[in-house]
Structure formats: structure tokens, C-alpha cells
Amino acid sequence: MLKVVMAVAMVVVGLVGATVATPAFGDGSGAVNATVSASAPCLTVNTTPLVFPTQKFSTNSLNGISAISNGPAVMNCSGQTASIIGSGSDATGPNSSPTWLLTPVTLPQTVCGGSGELRTINKFALGLRFSDAEPTLSKLGVALKSVANGANLPAYDLELFMPCTTSDGAGTVMSFQITFTASLP
């Protein structure tokens, strides 16, 4: 009987030894696959067309300002804080005539008087009035605000500074674009 018990014990020890972790022998190195997603500039913009109210041309003593309260919503979806840049295009009438040149201006001032930037004909300006600043747009782009991920550009009003009185386009519907761009640090 002792021989049977010893034989069974040897079989059990042999099976246990086979299931105990033993060092693995293999290559001198190993590789692990990995991935990362890089954040990219991302904005969502309310693209409903804007129709500015009819306004008279600017004069030497009074800015003709056509305004829209609460400009379109612009939300940062970049995954991190982004600088929002605003730019605009020249304005054109039907069949591309007449043309008004988008011109940045320094506010506050009378844009057609004295040293005003619009005092020559067929120039206009676009401003964004925030609670703490009023930058005007250029064709190249102007930094507006830094906006956290998932947040909207702070509330603003859009202001169109009409060309000076001797400009072309009276009675004409002029068309232009406003572009918002996200820039990551």
C-alpha cells in the first residue's frame, strides 16, 4: 500500500510542479503597442446668415454703425484651451461691384474724420464688442479671446462701420464673410 501512496504522491507532485510558474525563456527584448490622440483645432460655429440693419454712410462727425446684438455662438471643441482668431473678407455688391475693402480701425474714433482709417472711399470695418474690448477684424485675422475647451467665445455684438459718404454702393446689398479660427498653443 505504501508503494501505491508514494506513486500517487509522486504523480501529484509532478502535476503541481508543472502548474507552478517558472521563468519563461524567450527573446532578449519585448515591444508593447501604444497609441495617443493629438488634439487638433476645433470650433463649432452657428452659421446662420447674418443680416445687418440698413445704415447710412459714415460722415466726418458721425460713425454709421450697423449692429447685431449677440453675435453667432462660437464654441471651442479642441480638447484644450484655444485662442480664437477672427477675420473678415472685403464686401462686394451684386456681380462683384462695387467693392468695399475691409480695413481695421482704432476705436473709439470717428472713422471718416481727421485721421480716421476709413476717410478714403470704399472702406468699411467690422468690430466685435466684448464687455472688455472691441477689436476690429482684418483679412489676416485678429486674436479675439482665449477660450477653454467646451466653452463659448464670450458674448459679443457685431458692429459694421459703414464707409464714408463719398463711397460707392448706396442702396446696394453688400456681401462679406466673417471667419473664426481656433489656434492651439
Image (cartoon, grey):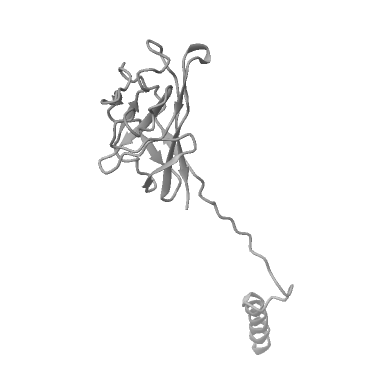
Q: Position of residue 157 (x, y in %)?
A: 29, 32
When asked about the image quadrant of residue 129, the answer is top left
Q: Residue furthest front?
A: 114
Residue for point 42% across, 17% down: 174
When asked about the image quadrant of residue 55, the answer is top left
Residue for point 33% across, 35% down: 128
Q: Position of residue 175 (x, y in %)?
A: 44, 19
Please state, as top left, top right, bottom left or bottom right, where the N terminus lies in the image: bottom right
User: On screen, 164 above or below 94?
Assistant: below
Q: Position of residue 153 (x, y in %)?
A: 35, 40
**Is 108 left, or right, of 89 in this rendering?**
left
Q: Position of residue 170 (x, y in %)?
A: 38, 12
User: On screen, 27 above or below 88?
Assistant: below
* Foreground of the two, 81 or 69: 69
* Foreground of the two, 77 or 110: 110
When asked about the image quadrant of residue 8, the answer is bottom right
**Is 59 left, or right, of 139 in this rendering?**
left
User: On screen, 9 above or below 162?
Assistant: below
* Foreground of the two, 5 or 97: 97
The number of numbered badges drawn on the structure is 0
Residue for point 68% across, 84% down: 7
